[in-house]
Amino acid sequence: VFFNVPPSRALPDLTPFAAEIRRVSSRIALGTLFYSFYNQWPLPQSFFYAVDAGMSIGFCTDVVEPNVTSRAFTVVYILLGASCVGGALVLMVQSILEQAAQRSLVRYKRILEKDSFKKEFFRRNRTGWMTFFSGVSTSSSSSEDGGILSCKDFRESLEKNLGKELSEDEFHRVCLTYDPHQNGFVQYEHFKKIFKGNDKILSTLQHHHNTRLVRCLLQVWGAVSPIFTDENKRIYLIFITYICVGVAWGIINQGWDVITATHFAVSALATGGLTAPPVDENGFLPPGPAIFCGLYCIFGIPLFALTLSQFASVLVENYIVEEELLAIKRPLTRSEFQFASQSLCSSDIGIHMSDFIVLQLFRQGKLSLESLEFMKRQFQLLDTNRSGRLNWDEAQKYYV
């Protein structure tokens, strides 16, 4: 039975993003009150300008600050806004790295599950427990592919790894995947190519239909449904819908063509502000467009950032996971061996498992020498009897 791994690309914790939105909203409220009071602007235009300057959008409008003091305030206001933008970028990068870490956990889990099956293939081949119909020989299996398991042995291995007993119908469904020609045995070479994890097998057991048409429709639905059901993919649907709202407003309210309206909707969320509603004859933005643009950007820009972080994670997480796996599998150098055997957890000439694990954390940049020394210090403080191990009473203590 393997450890439970959360979905590899679920949405990140939105609490930091919510805190960032609260800070931005507070600044925009302050800016709105200042521009309204000092420049004698209507509240809708003051709100629009506070969003425009505070979120560094720079809409191409004819709204102009009438005096130097207001411009001086805006300089400070924009600099404070830039710090919030920087904080949002940090949150985006952190979100991408967290999702890559989750992806790594899923990848490790699948490797461990496959190894568990591989051990069964090798073990049963060595002990001669396979029973096949006439003409099938165990000598045909090589050490590279791990050999062959009879359906009976494969079922035992399957139930052991899934942690549940399978009915005849359930096992037959699994065999349709791993023994497609109904030969009565499963080859490891074929098994390892199509094995996608225990979760995939369990999903196969839950959804089964005999007709080809139904299976095809379910495959299509399986490709499309994550847009509606998967939190990670749902963000794209929400973002596209939000863009469509901006486009529809531009067409209906401003009378723009589709391209101009899309230009407004996208550039506003990307803080480009390349298209904006016009001012009236008094140099003021009409209340409706001013309020819509302000609200559209307040909620849309964080949504745009969150969508970008999800999309970026799709692009980079596989690379990060592969680099992490390569770092773990890469042979040790002489200097790494000496460092692990003399400076980490043990002090003899060999490398213990604890040394190897700590060394891999160093290789991946997840541990520094200073943090390791501090952990050793904490262990030594807790290990009051100097036994080299902690009992429960010692482990409960706290030292600063």
Image (cartoon, helix red, strand yellow):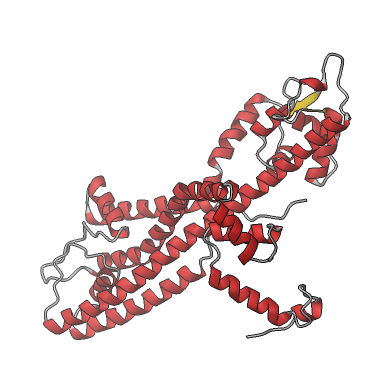
- The answer to whether any part of residue 11 appears in the image is no
Residue 67 pos. (x, y %): 11, 81
Image height check: is 72 above or below 142?
Answer: below
The residue at 16%/66% (across/down) is 279
Q: Position of residue 200 (x, y in %)?
A: 68, 41
Compared to 36, does 212 lie above or below? above
* Left/right of residue 17 with respect to residue 62 in the rendered view: right
Residue 149 position (above or below residue 105): above
Asked whether 222 or 391 is in front, the reply is: 391
Work out whether 59 lies above or below 129. Answer: below
Determine whether, in the image, residue 126 is placed left or right of residue 78: right
Q: Residue at x 88, y 32 (%)?
A: 127
Where is residue 346 shown, x and y percent of the image?
Answer: 69, 65
Nearer the observer, 78 or 358: 358
Residue 395 appears in which quarter of the rendering? bottom right
Q: Residue at x 47, y 52 (%)?
A: 313
Left or right: residue 206 compared with residue 16: right
Compare residues 39 and 274 and report the one nearer the observer.
274
Horizontal and vertical percent position of residue 269 = 32, 59
